[in-house]
Image: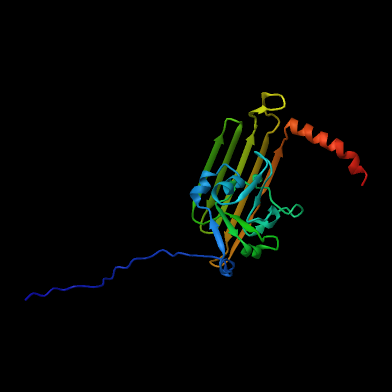
Amino acid sequence: MFCFEIKAQTNYTIALHKIEIRTSKLNYCITGRKFQNIDSTTLDLFKNQTLADLLASTIPIFIKNYGEGALSTTSFRGGNASQTVILWNGINIQNSMLGQVDLSNISNNLFSDVSIEYGGSSALRGSGAIGDAIHLGNNLGFNKATYTKLNVMGSDVGLKSIGSDIGFSNSKFSFCLKAFDVKNENEFSYFDKSDAKIVRQKNADYEQITALPEFKYKINSHQTLSAGACLLKGVRNFPSQNKLLILQMSTSTQRKINLF
Protein backbone atom coordinates (compact mmCIF):
# COMPACT_ATOMS: atom_id res chain seq x y z
CA MET A 1 0.00 0.00 0.00
CA PHE A 2 1.13 3.52 -0.80
CA CYS A 3 0.23 6.82 0.83
CA PHE A 4 0.21 10.22 -0.87
CA GLU A 5 -0.26 13.64 0.65
CA ILE A 6 -2.84 15.79 -1.17
CA LYS A 7 -3.41 19.49 -0.40
CA ALA A 8 -6.82 20.85 -1.32
CA GLN A 9 -5.98 24.47 -0.48
CA THR A 10 -2.85 26.58 -0.49
CA ASN A 11 -1.87 29.95 0.90
CA TYR A 12 -1.90 31.48 -2.60
CA THR A 13 -4.71 34.03 -3.05
CA ILE A 14 -5.96 35.92 -6.10
CA ALA A 15 -6.71 39.60 -5.65
CA LEU A 16 -9.74 40.71 -7.67
CA HIS A 17 -10.04 44.31 -8.81
CA LYS A 18 -12.92 46.29 -7.40
CA ILE A 19 -15.83 46.85 -9.79
CA GLU A 20 -18.38 49.61 -9.20
CA ILE A 21 -21.80 49.58 -10.86
CA ARG A 22 -23.80 52.77 -10.47
CA THR A 23 -27.29 53.59 -11.67
CA SER A 24 -30.28 55.73 -10.85
CA LYS A 25 -33.43 54.56 -9.08
CA LEU A 26 -35.48 56.37 -11.74
CA ASN A 27 -34.34 53.76 -14.27
CA TYR A 28 -36.30 50.98 -12.54
CA CYS A 29 -39.34 52.68 -11.00
CA ILE A 30 -41.67 52.05 -13.97
CA THR A 31 -42.66 48.64 -15.27
CA GLY A 32 -42.34 48.16 -19.02
CA ARG A 33 -39.80 50.91 -19.45
CA LYS A 34 -37.90 50.83 -22.78
CA PHE A 35 -34.38 52.18 -22.88
CA GLN A 36 -31.99 51.90 -25.84
CA ASN A 37 -28.25 52.58 -25.68
CA ILE A 38 -26.19 53.29 -28.80
CA ASP A 39 -22.93 51.35 -28.63
CA SER A 40 -19.50 52.95 -28.91
CA THR A 41 -18.75 51.38 -32.30
CA THR A 42 -21.78 53.06 -33.87
CA LEU A 43 -20.87 56.37 -32.25
CA ASP A 44 -17.40 56.17 -33.80
CA LEU A 45 -18.92 55.61 -37.26
CA PHE A 46 -20.96 58.84 -36.94
CA LYS A 47 -18.21 60.79 -35.18
CA ASN A 48 -18.10 63.59 -37.76
CA GLN A 49 -21.87 63.85 -38.26
CA THR A 50 -24.76 65.36 -36.37
CA LEU A 51 -27.09 63.80 -33.84
CA ALA A 52 -29.89 63.89 -36.43
CA ASP A 53 -27.86 61.63 -38.77
CA LEU A 54 -27.11 59.21 -35.94
CA LEU A 55 -30.72 58.85 -34.79
CA ALA A 56 -32.12 58.57 -38.33
CA SER A 57 -29.71 55.74 -39.20
CA THR A 58 -29.68 53.66 -36.02
CA ILE A 59 -33.11 53.74 -34.38
CA PRO A 60 -36.72 53.62 -35.68
CA ILE A 61 -37.40 57.33 -35.52
CA PHE A 62 -38.58 59.90 -38.03
CA ILE A 63 -36.32 62.95 -38.39
CA LYS A 64 -37.91 65.97 -40.03
CA ASN A 65 -35.00 67.35 -42.03
CA TYR A 66 -35.07 70.48 -44.18
CA GLY A 67 -31.76 69.90 -45.93
CA GLU A 68 -28.06 69.78 -45.24
CA GLY A 69 -27.24 72.06 -42.33
CA ALA A 70 -30.89 73.12 -41.95
CA LEU A 71 -33.43 72.50 -39.20
CA SER A 72 -33.76 68.88 -37.99
CA THR A 73 -36.32 67.82 -35.38
CA THR A 74 -37.68 64.52 -34.04
CA SER A 75 -41.02 62.75 -34.14
CA PHE A 76 -41.25 59.87 -31.65
CA ARG A 77 -44.35 57.66 -31.66
CA GLY A 78 -46.54 60.37 -33.10
CA GLY A 79 -45.26 63.09 -30.78
CA ASN A 80 -43.87 66.37 -32.06
CA ALA A 81 -40.47 67.91 -31.38
CA SER A 82 -41.70 69.85 -28.34
CA GLN A 83 -42.60 66.52 -26.67
CA THR A 84 -39.02 65.24 -27.00
CA VAL A 85 -36.61 66.35 -24.31
CA ILE A 86 -32.82 66.48 -24.86
CA LEU A 87 -30.87 65.96 -21.64
CA TRP A 88 -27.16 66.70 -21.29
CA ASN A 89 -25.95 65.09 -18.05
CA GLY A 90 -29.53 65.30 -16.81
CA ILE A 91 -29.93 68.99 -17.74
CA ASN A 92 -32.62 69.96 -20.20
CA ILE A 93 -30.99 71.87 -23.09
CA GLN A 94 -34.21 72.67 -24.93
CA ASN A 95 -34.76 76.25 -26.00
CA SER A 96 -36.97 77.71 -23.27
CA MET A 97 -38.73 80.01 -25.77
CA LEU A 98 -39.01 77.64 -28.74
CA GLY A 99 -39.60 74.45 -26.73
CA GLN A 100 -37.46 72.20 -28.95
CA VAL A 101 -33.89 71.51 -30.05
CA ASP A 102 -32.36 71.64 -33.53
CA LEU A 103 -30.49 68.32 -33.80
CA SER A 104 -28.39 69.57 -36.71
CA ASN A 105 -26.52 71.82 -34.24
CA ILE A 106 -25.46 68.88 -32.01
CA SER A 107 -22.34 67.00 -33.08
CA ASN A 108 -21.76 63.37 -32.13
CA ASN A 109 -18.10 64.18 -31.57
CA LEU A 110 -19.00 65.86 -28.29
CA PHE A 111 -20.52 62.85 -26.53
CA SER A 112 -19.45 59.31 -25.68
CA ASP A 113 -22.80 58.29 -24.23
CA VAL A 114 -26.07 58.51 -26.23
CA SER A 115 -29.26 56.71 -25.20
CA ILE A 116 -32.98 56.99 -25.94
CA GLU A 117 -35.82 56.53 -23.47
CA TYR A 118 -39.17 55.74 -25.07
CA GLY A 119 -42.74 56.21 -23.96
CA GLY A 120 -44.46 57.63 -20.91
CA SER A 121 -41.60 56.85 -18.50
CA SER A 122 -39.66 59.70 -20.05
CA ALA A 123 -42.16 62.09 -18.41
CA LEU A 124 -40.08 61.63 -15.25
CA ARG A 125 -37.58 63.98 -16.87
CA GLY A 126 -40.11 66.83 -17.12
CA SER A 127 -43.67 67.72 -18.05
CA GLY A 128 -42.79 68.18 -21.73
CA ALA A 129 -41.18 64.75 -22.21
CA ILE A 130 -44.26 62.59 -22.79
CA GLY A 131 -42.92 61.37 -26.15
CA ASP A 132 -39.37 60.36 -25.35
CA ALA A 133 -36.08 61.54 -23.86
CA ILE A 134 -32.63 61.60 -25.46
CA HIS A 135 -29.77 61.36 -22.96
CA LEU A 136 -26.35 62.79 -23.83
CA GLY A 137 -23.23 62.65 -21.70
CA ASN A 138 -19.59 61.67 -21.24
CA ASN A 139 -17.94 59.20 -18.92
CA LEU A 140 -15.08 61.08 -17.32
CA GLY A 141 -12.90 58.57 -15.53
CA PHE A 142 -9.80 58.88 -13.40
CA ASN A 143 -6.26 57.55 -13.78
CA LYS A 144 -6.30 57.73 -17.57
CA ALA A 145 -3.21 59.98 -17.93
CA THR A 146 -3.12 62.20 -21.05
CA TYR A 147 -4.85 61.32 -24.33
CA THR A 148 -5.54 63.05 -27.64
CA LYS A 149 -7.90 62.11 -30.49
CA LEU A 150 -8.37 63.76 -33.86
CA ASN A 151 -11.04 63.17 -36.54
CA VAL A 152 -10.98 64.68 -40.03
CA MET A 153 -13.52 64.28 -42.85
CA GLY A 154 -14.14 65.81 -46.30
CA SER A 155 -16.50 65.37 -49.26
CA ASP A 156 -16.86 66.41 -52.90
CA VAL A 157 -19.58 69.01 -52.13
CA GLY A 158 -17.20 71.13 -50.07
CA LEU A 159 -17.70 69.55 -46.64
CA LYS A 160 -14.75 69.89 -44.29
CA SER A 161 -14.88 68.89 -40.65
CA ILE A 162 -12.36 68.40 -37.89
CA GLY A 163 -12.94 67.19 -34.35
CA SER A 164 -10.59 66.90 -31.41
CA ASP A 165 -10.77 65.22 -28.02
CA ILE A 166 -8.12 66.19 -25.46
CA GLY A 167 -8.13 64.98 -21.88
CA PHE A 168 -6.09 64.43 -18.75
CA SER A 169 -6.88 62.65 -15.50
CA ASN A 170 -5.20 61.34 -12.38
CA SER A 171 -6.48 59.90 -9.12
CA LYS A 172 -8.23 63.14 -8.05
CA PHE A 173 -8.69 65.30 -11.14
CA SER A 174 -10.20 64.70 -14.59
CA PHE A 175 -10.51 67.18 -17.46
CA CYS A 176 -11.75 66.81 -21.03
CA LEU A 177 -12.10 69.29 -23.90
CA LYS A 178 -14.00 68.28 -27.03
CA ALA A 179 -14.23 70.62 -30.00
CA PHE A 180 -15.77 70.29 -33.45
CA ASP A 181 -15.66 72.54 -36.50
CA VAL A 182 -17.60 71.81 -39.69
CA LYS A 183 -17.84 73.95 -42.82
CA ASN A 184 -19.81 72.98 -45.90
CA GLU A 185 -19.98 75.00 -49.11
CA ASN A 186 -22.98 72.83 -50.07
CA GLU A 187 -22.62 73.49 -53.80
CA PHE A 188 -24.06 70.86 -56.13
CA SER A 189 -25.65 70.61 -59.57
CA TYR A 190 -29.32 69.84 -60.17
CA PHE A 191 -31.88 70.02 -62.96
CA ASP A 192 -34.06 73.13 -62.89
CA LYS A 193 -37.45 72.32 -64.41
CA SER A 194 -38.44 75.97 -64.83
CA ASP A 195 -35.42 76.76 -67.05
CA ALA A 196 -34.99 73.17 -68.33
CA LYS A 197 -31.28 73.17 -67.68
CA ILE A 198 -28.71 72.04 -65.16
CA VAL A 199 -27.76 74.72 -62.65
CA ARG A 200 -25.45 74.77 -59.66
CA GLN A 201 -26.74 75.46 -56.18
CA LYS A 202 -24.94 78.37 -54.49
CA ASN A 203 -25.21 80.46 -51.33
CA ALA A 204 -26.32 77.46 -49.25
CA ASP A 205 -23.16 77.10 -47.17
CA TYR A 206 -23.05 76.80 -43.39
CA GLU A 207 -20.49 76.59 -40.61
CA GLN A 208 -20.72 75.30 -37.04
CA ILE A 209 -18.17 75.56 -34.25
CA THR A 210 -18.81 73.77 -30.96
CA ALA A 211 -16.75 73.23 -27.82
CA LEU A 212 -17.49 71.14 -24.74
CA PRO A 213 -15.13 71.51 -21.74
CA GLU A 214 -15.84 69.29 -18.73
CA PHE A 215 -14.18 69.03 -15.35
CA LYS A 216 -14.49 66.55 -12.49
CA TYR A 217 -12.81 66.58 -9.08
CA LYS A 218 -12.99 63.74 -6.57
CA ILE A 219 -13.44 65.22 -3.10
CA ASN A 220 -13.46 61.83 -1.39
CA SER A 221 -14.61 58.29 -2.11
CA HIS A 222 -18.29 59.33 -1.86
CA GLN A 223 -18.35 62.89 -3.23
CA THR A 224 -17.44 64.28 -6.67
CA LEU A 225 -17.59 67.84 -7.97
CA SER A 226 -18.40 68.24 -11.69
CA ALA A 227 -18.65 71.25 -13.99
CA GLY A 228 -19.09 71.70 -17.74
CA ALA A 229 -20.19 74.04 -20.50
CA CYS A 230 -21.46 73.62 -24.06
CA LEU A 231 -20.56 76.43 -26.47
CA LEU A 232 -22.02 76.71 -29.97
CA LYS A 233 -21.63 79.15 -32.84
CA GLY A 234 -23.49 78.54 -36.09
CA VAL A 235 -23.89 80.45 -39.37
CA ARG A 236 -26.37 79.43 -42.09
CA ASN A 237 -26.93 80.93 -45.52
CA PHE A 238 -30.01 80.47 -47.66
CA PRO A 239 -29.95 79.96 -51.45
CA SER A 240 -30.65 83.05 -53.53
CA GLN A 241 -33.61 81.44 -55.33
CA ASN A 242 -35.28 80.59 -52.03
CA LYS A 243 -34.66 84.15 -50.83
CA LEU A 244 -36.37 85.54 -53.92
CA LEU A 245 -39.34 83.27 -53.34
CA ILE A 246 -39.61 84.33 -49.71
CA LEU A 247 -39.47 88.01 -50.69
CA GLN A 248 -42.21 87.54 -53.26
CA MET A 249 -44.43 85.78 -50.72
CA SER A 250 -43.79 88.43 -48.06
CA THR A 251 -44.58 91.37 -50.36
CA SER A 252 -47.87 89.81 -51.46
CA THR A 253 -49.01 89.33 -47.85
CA GLN A 254 -47.51 92.47 -46.34
CA ARG A 255 -50.66 94.57 -46.73
CA LYS A 256 -52.83 91.92 -45.10
CA ILE A 257 -50.47 91.64 -42.14
CA ASN A 258 -50.40 95.41 -41.60
CA LEU A 259 -54.19 95.49 -41.29
CA PHE A 260 -54.07 93.69 -37.95
Q: Residue at x 32, y 68 (%)?
A: 13
Q: Is residue 159 above or below residue 34?
A: above
Residue for point 51% across, 44% down: 45
The spot of residue 199 in percent (x, y) is 67, 25
**Residue closest to the eye, 129 or 21:** 129
The residue nearer to you, when weighing 144 against 51, is 51
Q: In which quarter of the view is residue 235 placed?
A: top right
Q: Residue furthest right?
A: 259
For the image, the number of numbered tags is: 0
Left or right of 5, for residue 209: right
Q: Does residue 87 lie above or below 20 as drawn?
A: above
Expressed as whole percent of the image width and height from the top left, the position of residue 203 reads 71, 31
Residue 133 horizontal/vertical position (percent): 63, 58
Coloring scheme used: rainbow
**Image-quadrant location for residue 129:** bottom right
Residue found at the far left of this picture: 1
> Percent position (x, y) of residue 132?
63, 58
The residue sitting at 54% across, 40% down in the picture is: 151
Instruction: Please state, as top left, top right, bottom left or bottom right, where the N terminus lies in the image.
Output: bottom left
Quarter of the image for residue 113 reads bottom right
